[in-house]
Amino acid sequence: MNIDKDLVAASATPLVLAILAESESYGYAILKRVREISDGELEWTDGMLYPLLHRLHRLGYVTREWRIPSEERRRRYYAITDEGHAALAEHKRQWVTVAKALGDAWGGGDLLPLAFGRA
Amino acid sequence: MDQLELEIQGWRAFVEQSPAVDGRDVEELEDHLRDQIADLTEAGLTSDEAFLIAVKRLGSIDEISREFARENSGRLWRQLTAPGGSDFEQTGRWWRQALLFAIAAAVTFQIAFLAAGTPPDESSWLLRNASLLVLPFLAGYFVARRRLSWNQVLVTAAPFVIAAVVINVYPFIDGGSTELLAASHLPVVLWFVVAYPYMNGVTRSHERRMDFVRFTGEWFIYYVLISLGGGVLVGLTLAVLEPAGVDPDQIAQWVLPWGSAGAVIVAAWLVETKQRVIENMAPVLTMVFTPLFALMLAGAAVVYAVTGLGGAFNRELLGVFDALLVVVLGLVLYGISARDPLQGPGWMDRIQLVAVVSALVLDLMVLGVMVARIGELGFTPNRTAALGLNLVLLASLIGTAWLSARFLTGRSTFHRLERWQTTYLPVFGVWAATVVVVLPPLFSFS
């Protein structure tokens, strides 16, 4: 399935914040996690994650820090802040509303909100 | 080096061309690329294939850098917009604006110079007020260029007014040392005031502070270049006109004042507009002079550690030492601001540490002698100002040495070192203001 570009872009922020809410992480691992939880359906242009992380950092939703894990290369780790948690909650609220409206409109009822309720 | 490394380096060089993607972002993207290549190679691809697919997945660098450009504000948009054709008109307007302020500063200073009378040794008025006659125009130029709000204009103007009152109302004893100290520290204070409009009023931002450090270094280089050119011009003019019976003093009196005042604003304009030119030149100069200064400082530290400072110590030497330490600190500060923060510790950082540690040793020796002298002869304005300056420098040097040692041993990031510099920066301004405002009454304007 080819998901619409705009939809991918709109879901990027809550998705990244949700992944960071699980645990702190770095760019490549975040992208792997996105593929994992979307079963490979969400196709991101990998590089675009980084300007997004930049923006989240500027907004104070995430902190970032260079660390040197076991290998010789240093790597930038991101962790969610309280503000990030708040923003994530707000995103959830909006998506649930949209999903509920769509579910009602399609008459399929509860499926979509249920899926979101889990998140 | 194997083929893959070469390919990654080529890719990296390509990404680095984009002005919007800064060094650390490039490093992050490279880290991503390498992870991807490692995974793909593990899945059975050859390193060539893995590289191609990883680059493809990362996406178009143009698009990424456009996204970054949207994200990064500040100095980046300037570089990005400068070459664009539609901004040409804008540049033209800025040029006229800069010229206007430069002429205003030049005329003001020229009038003051003539009004003070020649030879100007009669009155120390000009000496005290020199920076007050020029730097408000520089601040004004930034106010106009950054389109500051009226509140910000007031915040910018207030310190100038206060300084003008203080420096002219204080009953300095003519030629006394508090007067000289106030005159020499006032430009520093006012330079920090100029930082406010330069930084668009956002004084808390560490990035903006670093920008201002960069600006200061680059402004200095441009100013020196203009002065050298001006010197050649004046010299030739004298050589040509003197045989015709023109008095050289006349030329000096009519050319030097407005030239040196106007150049302050022109240099600032050049830094702002010709970013790329100076950005290529300044790091090279730092790279040339940091090792030389490190060598000289280390030599001096060794010599004075062996011979002892006490015997050779006098007021002139103290002044020389302080000037030296300030220059070294400026060099280090500028080196840090111009450095590509993405790179790991390199030989330049080691040389810089040598310079800082040697400066630290010298500073400690100077402090030791000075404290002994004060204990023996008591406080004077000069000794107090020198002691304060040396203590302020000492704290800065200790922090720099400690953090850059930690950075070199991989226990800290370069970012911490940068942060230390930008956090400490206001201390210099505060100390200079103290010398101008508090010291004179303390020593009853002697």
Image (cartoon, helix red, strand yellow):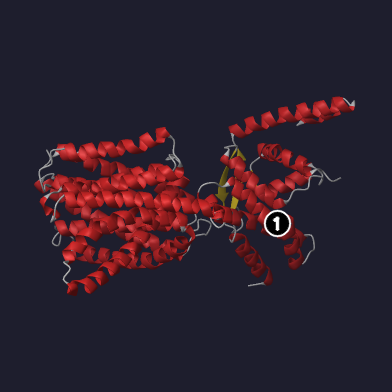
Q: Nearer the viewer, residue B54 or B214?
A: B214
Is residue B398 visible in this depiction of the protein? no
Q: Nearer the viewer, residue B386 or B237?
A: B237
Residue B272 % position (x, y): 44, 54
Task: Please report the residue visible at 46 percent of the width from the left and 48 percent of the height from the top.
Answer: B416
Q: Residues within 10 Å of mark 1 (few under 14, many from 20)?
A: some
**Residue that label 1 marks:** B60
Q: Quadrant of residue B5?
A: bottom right
| Outermost residue to the right | A107
Q: Is residue B156 left or right of residue B121?
A: right
Location of the C terminus of chain B (image quadrant): top left
The mark total stands at 1
Location of the N terminus of chain B (image quadrant): bottom right
- Chain assignment, label 1: B
Q: Nearer the viewer, residue B18 or B226?
A: B226
Residue B296 % position (x, y): 29, 67
Q: Check disc 1 and report its element: helix, strand or loop.
A: loop
Amino acid type at image mark 1 = Ser
| Outermost residue to the front | B244
Residue B90 % position (x, y): 51, 50
Q: Is residue B364 left or right of residue B117?
A: right
Residue B79 % position (x, y): 53, 55
Q: Is residue A110 above or below residue A32?
A: above
Is residue B248 visible in this depiction of the protein? yes
Task: Please report the residue visible at 57 percent of the width from the left and 56 percent of the height from the top.
Answer: B85
Task: Please report the residue visible at 73 percent of the width from the left and 42 percent of the height from the top.
Answer: A9
Q: Is residue A20 left or right of residue B446?
A: right
